[in-house]
Amino acid sequence: RARVLIVGSGQGGFQVAASLRDEGFDGPIAIIGEEPGLPYQRPPLSKAYLTGKAHEEQVRLRPASFYESRNIELLVPERALSIARDQQLVKLESGHRLEYKHLVLATGARPRRIRVVGVELDGVFTLRCLAEAEAIRTGLESATNIVIIGAGFIGLEIAAVARAMGLTTHIIDFAERPLKRSVSAKTGNFLTEAHTEQGVQFHFMTAISEITGADGRVTGVATTDGRHFPADLVVIGIGVEPNVELARDAGLKIDNGIVVDRQLLTADPSISAIGDSANYPTDFFPHPVRIESVQNAVDQARCVAARLAGKPAPYRKVPWFWSDQGQYKLQIAGVAQEGDDAVVRGDMASGKFSVFRFRDGRLSCVESVNQAADHLAARKLIEKSTQLSSEQAGDSTISLSQLAA
Ligand code: FAD
């Protein structure tokens, strides 16, 4: 009964177990994960892994000996089917039942599907797990034409890799610019230009009508305006949806993720939820958020582990994120909303700048391109709610790190 049971062997699930041991927790810990193999990091899957520069050993979070030496039971591949809250146990696909004293749901998210003819063809992929990255990498080696559906982070990162490998690269999106939900128009338009210079061909405000194929293999993507883009590889990156079914079936509240409080607890005091699957209240946004980033999964895992080890504290970390796109490193601190003001610091033409976002006169978010120092200062400014005017933000002669100190 003293067991901490973690569902999900991804970034967050792994971190809960590791941090529990770091905090001195000496009770039993088990991680249940439906993916085979050791927990690994996802960010390289749309970057170095696709170029062949990183392999499975490099993306692994820890070697097998880590789990043995810390007495962390790793049950993979194994799927959690249901939670019996009244008995505090989880039923597994293998038929086993595991009791828990505390249950952490770190179930992550899965790629959103599109409903068009042809999605099932060979050569059409989404990208969430190692197996898919492996298949895309193999596909990239022999492909000439790639069509990417969705100009989100994953789509842009894959496009940068594909162009570096010499593929004809098209990105189709129904929005008018990339990363519409995540960054300002200024940053989005900069990235459009940057990728276009590298040869990526964007088709915005364009909808897919069909993925075409022959003999079960993809041949291209047709759009509703009557065009057809030949492709031997298609990647769909149109966002994710949180894995909430386990929690929903157990009667826990769902609202764009598993609803948790400031301690990352669900309404059941024996069940926490973290990472891509959790929706939580934060000081940094007007309403609860669900954040998809390594930082969020790791810091929330640490927060839950500390609570379970007897050091409870509310979760209060500034969200931050990065994305590598060819020669550009985009870093984002805070959470913006469409309509937040956007003030540029630095010279966009030089490829090194930050966009400061303001909501009701307060700094909400900073998007930095090849400006790591701005990003680090921004995290502090947002954390401390430092008063910053848009004039100060846009004036490169004013030291941000001093303001943040
Ligand atoms: P995950 O890491 O997704 O882990 C959840 C795990 O739970 C999965 O293995 C899933 O199969 C398993 N699971 C779900 N339900 C069950 C069940 N019932 N039984 C058993 N197992 C179950 N973030 C950044 O900050 N920077 C980046 O550059 C970046 N790049 C990315 C690139 C790619 C290609 C992807 C896919 C993500 C990227 N991210 C990036 C996002 C980041 O990887 C995620 O935010 C992070 O992995 C979330 O961790 P998590 O533990 O919540 O979920």
Image (cartoon, rainbow, N blue to C red):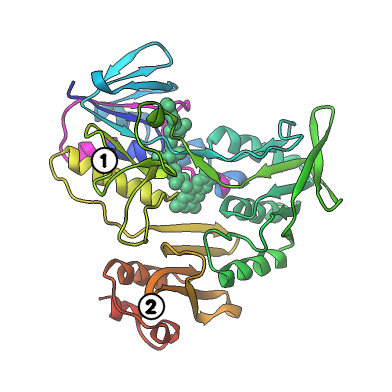
Q: Which residues are magenta?
A: 17-46
Q: Residue 283's image quarter?
A: bottom left
Is residue 382 left or right of 24 when viewed as pictured?
Answer: right
Q: Earlier in the sequence, mark 2 or mark 1?
A: 1
Is residue 202 left or right of 75 when viewed as pictured?
Answer: right
* Residue 151: mark in rendering: none
Q: Position of residue 224 (x, y in %)?
A: 81, 49
Residue type (three-letter) at the residue carrying disc 1: Leu
Residue 149 to residue 320: above or below: above
Q: Residue 204's image quarter?
A: bottom right
Q: Residue furthest left?
A: 310
Residue where numbered disc 1 is placed? 265
Q: Is residue 166 magenta?
A: no
Residue 273 to residue 146: above or below: above
* Residue 361: mark in rendering: 2
Q: Cβ–Cβ below 8 Å for labels 2 and 1?
A: no
Q: Position of residue 282 (x, y in %)?
A: 32, 56
Point 71% across, 35% down: residue? 119
Quarter of the image that includes the N terminus: top left
Q: Position of residue 321 (x, y in %)?
A: 44, 57
Is residue 198 left or right of 238 when viewed as pictured?
Answer: right
Q: Position of residue 352 (x, y in %)?
A: 53, 75
Residue 284 to residue 5: above or below: below
Residue type (three-letter) at the residue carrying disc 2: Gly
